[in-house]
Structure formats: C-alpha cells, structure tokens
C-alpha cells in the first residue's frame, strides 16, 4: 500500500485551488439514473469515490463517453440492470444513493448494504422507512436491500434524525413519484441545496431545499443533467487549517466562504487571521493559537468532517479545549495516532479533551478514515521531523492530488509506493 511521507516544520505559503465537491458530485451521478440521455458534469474531482460511482453506473449499463481532467459525459439511456453488487458498493457509503433512482425509474432495485469509513453506525434504516412510506416493498436478504414497487406514490416522510444521504435519496426518488412528497427534518447541507437546484434544472419540481421541510411535486420524466459541480467545502477548510498549523499564509481560491462559516468563526476565535473574498479565503497564522471548544452538528453547525483536522490544530494551541462529537460515535480513532506524535488527548465518551503542546514530533502513524487521514497529514506538516502515514488509500477517496497541492505550497511531502 502507498504511504505519504512528510518532513514537517515548513510554513505553507501560496495559493491553492479547490476541486469540485466529492459529496456534491456523488448524488448528482446517482441522479443521472433518473434521466435518459447524455449527462455532462464539469469540475468533477478525480477521487476514488467518484471513479467507484462511475464504475457502478457503468455496471448498471450506463455508457461513459468522456472522463478527462474534470469533465464527465455519461449516457444513462442504456441503463438496464437494477442490481448494485457488493464488490463495488462495499467500498463506498454513498453507493446506496442509487437505490432511490432505481426504484423511481425501474420499480425495482437490489443494492448491497453499503460500506465506507469505519467511523460509526450510519444506519440506512431511515432511507428504507422513507421508501416504504412512498409505497415500496423493502426487504433485507443476504446482505442486500431488495425493493419493488409498481409506482412510487407521494407521501409525508419524517426523518427521526437528520440524514444527508437519506434526504438526497428520498428527494431523487420523489422527483418521479406520483403526487406530492414532503420530507420533514431534512438535511440542510449545501450539497442538498445543490442537488435540488440541478434536479429542478432537469425538470423536477422541488421547493424548500436548505430548510427543514422539502416539498417535491412528482413529474413524469427528467431531462439529462448539465452542470458544474460546486467547490468542496471540506477541502477548503482542510487547507485553511493547514495554513494555521504550519504558521503559514495560504489563499484558497475557487471556494464558497459562506459554506465554511462555522469553521471561520472558530478559527478566528483561535486567533487565526482570515480574510474572505467573493470566492477566496486568505488564512494567516499571526498569533499564538488559542484553545477553542467545538461541538459537531449537522449543517449549518460545525461539520463532523472538520472535527479531526480541527483537533490537530488544537493539539498546538495554548490551554485546553473540549471537542464533542455528536454525529458519529466512533470518530476519535485519529486521537491515538496524534498521541504517537506527542499530542495530549483524553477521550471521555463523546468528548475529546485536548491539552495543547508547543510541538508535535514526527512518527509513523496509520490513517483510519478519510478525514483522519487529512488530520494526520496536517499534524505531519506541523511536526518536527519525519511523519510516515500509512493506509493513505483513505485520502484518495476524497482529496484530489493532496500531496501535489501541498507541495506547491512549499510542503516537503511525497508518496511512497
């Protein structure tokens, strides 16, 4: 397996361009199942989760006409299969997003229970309850979700807890259902708003995306999708934190500052200088880092996908901070690896107590999930000496050419095969 080797202690300086959002493009790719024709997507990040989703769509029968640089042209007219096999679905949680579109278009679907990062339970039962509310018969057999329906019917669906993939899945399915569907306690993430906008451009009738309640009037068909994927807000924040932990100065461009507002506020509390433009953010380490408490919440709260990176920053801050994880119950696995680098972190249930230390020291560490991978790379950039991060296939799932982008900012980082 590949390893990433970092020689730390170099302040990052320069400009970094943010790629398209992984979490935005995956539901858009799934939504192409709802259409019949050539779908054209631009600003598509070339990361492993995206290529896996494209492979899954090809396995269903879609034809990939073009995938060069950041553009994908995918013809969904030829889709004929309704089964998503284990060997593709097992590596990626978002693969369950094909379930709703398959049920809506074909009236049947057989999708392997999804895999992904080992960060805790992300139950799909909320999706299944919603599909049952829309009239589908859903069974679990031999590790597969099997769904059948003559025609999905509009209904009122209430999510017991906020679910991003559940909201996206039901919103896509309801777009071709008969009548009106109301999704209550819906996710408000920018990626949900973006999905609704793109579906509406294709002919769907969706209102309320970005609020608790989304209302969908079903239509008979959708036109092929043509869009440019919005910038990745998690990548944006990761490079902002990279500037802070290395005592550097980095301008992030091709981003949406309001999508990372909660992070900006907390970083400013920690003493980091941040200046926002229309589509850029300048981050400068101007003062000693201060300890700040955070508590993860669904959007617009502090994202769980920033928790690991922010913890790395807090290991270098003066004082003591409390980091509470409320979204996933098993998302502190990076804390032990940071401890190998000299961090002082105590886990108490859903809270990590972080006592700042003047320096981290390079060490061999192991990535446990996608965002943990990023946090360990950030720690390596800030540490004295060499850090070797193994199992970096996690980073390839969600960050496009991370080591190349960091190298352009002056980091001493390389990949070892």
Image: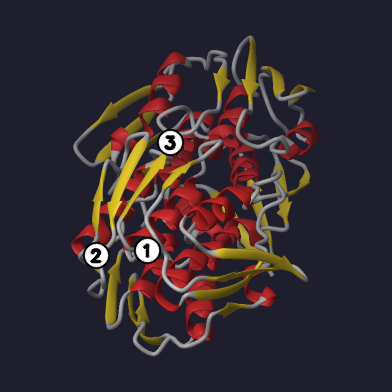
Q: Is residue 252 visible?
A: no
Q: Circle 3 is placed at which residue position? A: 240
- Pinpoint residue 136: horizontal percent, then vertical percent: 52, 64
- Taking the spot 57% from the left edge, 14% from the top edge, the residue there is 291
Q: Circle 2 is placed at which residue position? A: 227
Q: Is residue 324 visible?
A: yes
- Taking the spot 58% from the left edge, 55% from the top edge, the residue there is 128
**What is the spatial separation of the Cα atoms under label 2 and label 3, in whole angstroms?**
27 Å
Badge 1, how many Cα within 10 Å: few under 14, some, many 20+?
many
Q: Of the residues under marks 2 and 1, which one precedes in the sequence?
A: 1
Q: Circle 1 is placed at which residue position? A: 28
Q: Of the residues under marks 2 and 3, which one precedes in the sequence?
A: 2
Q: Of the residues under marks 3 and 1, which one precedes in the sequence?
A: 1
Choose between 3 and 203: the one closer to the eye. 203
View extreme (top): residue: 319
**What is the spatial separation of the Cα atoms under label 3 and label 1, in whole angstroms?**
27 Å
- Taking the spot 30% from the left edge, 57% from the top edge, the residue there is 179
Choose between 181 and 252: the one closer to the eye. 181
- Asked if disc 2 and disc 1 are in contact, CB closer than 8 Å, the reply is yes
- Asked if disc 3 and disc 1 are in contact, CB closer than 8 Å, the reply is no
């Amino acid at each position: 397996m590949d390893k990433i080797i970092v020689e730390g202690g170099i302040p990052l300086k320069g400009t970094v361009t943010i790629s398209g959002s992984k979490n935005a493009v995956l539901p858009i790719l799934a939504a192409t199942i709802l259409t019949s024709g050539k779908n054209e997507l631009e600003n598509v990040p070339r990361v492993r989760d995206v290529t896996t989703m494209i492979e899954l769509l090809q396995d269903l029968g879609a034809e990939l006409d073009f995938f060069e640089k950041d553009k994908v042209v995918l013809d969904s007219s030829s889709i004929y299969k309704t089964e998503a096999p284990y060997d593709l679905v097992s590596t990626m949680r978002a693969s369950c997003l094909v379930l709703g579109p398959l049920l809506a278009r074909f009236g049947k679907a057989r999708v392997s229970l999804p895999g992904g990062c080992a960060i805790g339970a992300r139950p799909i039962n909320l999706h299944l309850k919603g599909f049952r509310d829309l009239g589908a018969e859903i069974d679990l057999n031999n590790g597969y979700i099997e769904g059948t329906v003559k025609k999905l019917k509009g209904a009122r669906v209430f999510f017991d807890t906020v679910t991003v993939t559940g909201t996206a899945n039901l919103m896509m399915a309801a777009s071709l259902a008969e009548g009106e569907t109301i999704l209550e306690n819906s996710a408000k993430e920018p990626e949900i708003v973006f999905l609704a906008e793109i579906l509406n451009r294709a002919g769907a009738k969706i209102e309320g995306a970005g609020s608790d309640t989304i209302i969908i009037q079903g239509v008979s068909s959708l036109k092929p999708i043509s869009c440019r994927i919005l910038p990745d807000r998690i990548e944006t924040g990761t490079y902002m934190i990279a500037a802070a932990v290395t005592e550097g100065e980095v301008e992030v461009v091709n981003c949406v500052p309001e999508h990372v507002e909660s992070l900006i506020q907390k970083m400013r509390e920690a003493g980091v200088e941040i200046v926002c433009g229309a589509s850029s953010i300048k981050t400068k380490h101007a003062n000693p880092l201060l300890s700040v408490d955070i508590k993860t919440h669904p959007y617009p709260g502090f994202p769980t996908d920033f928790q690991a990176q922010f913890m790395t920053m807090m290991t270098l801050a003066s004082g003591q901070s409390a980091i509470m994880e409320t979204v996933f119950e098993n998302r502190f696995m990076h804390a032990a690896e940071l401890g190998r680098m000299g961090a002082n972190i105590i886990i108490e249930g859903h809270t990590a107590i972080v006592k700042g230390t003047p320096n981290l020291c390079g060490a061999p560490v192991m990535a446990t999930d996608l965002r943990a991978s990023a946090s360990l790379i950030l720690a390596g950039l800030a540490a004295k000496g060499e850090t070797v991060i193994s199992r970096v296939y996690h980073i390839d799932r969600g960050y496009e050419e991370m080591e190349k982008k960091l190298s352009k900012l002056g980091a001493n980082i390389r990949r070892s095969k």
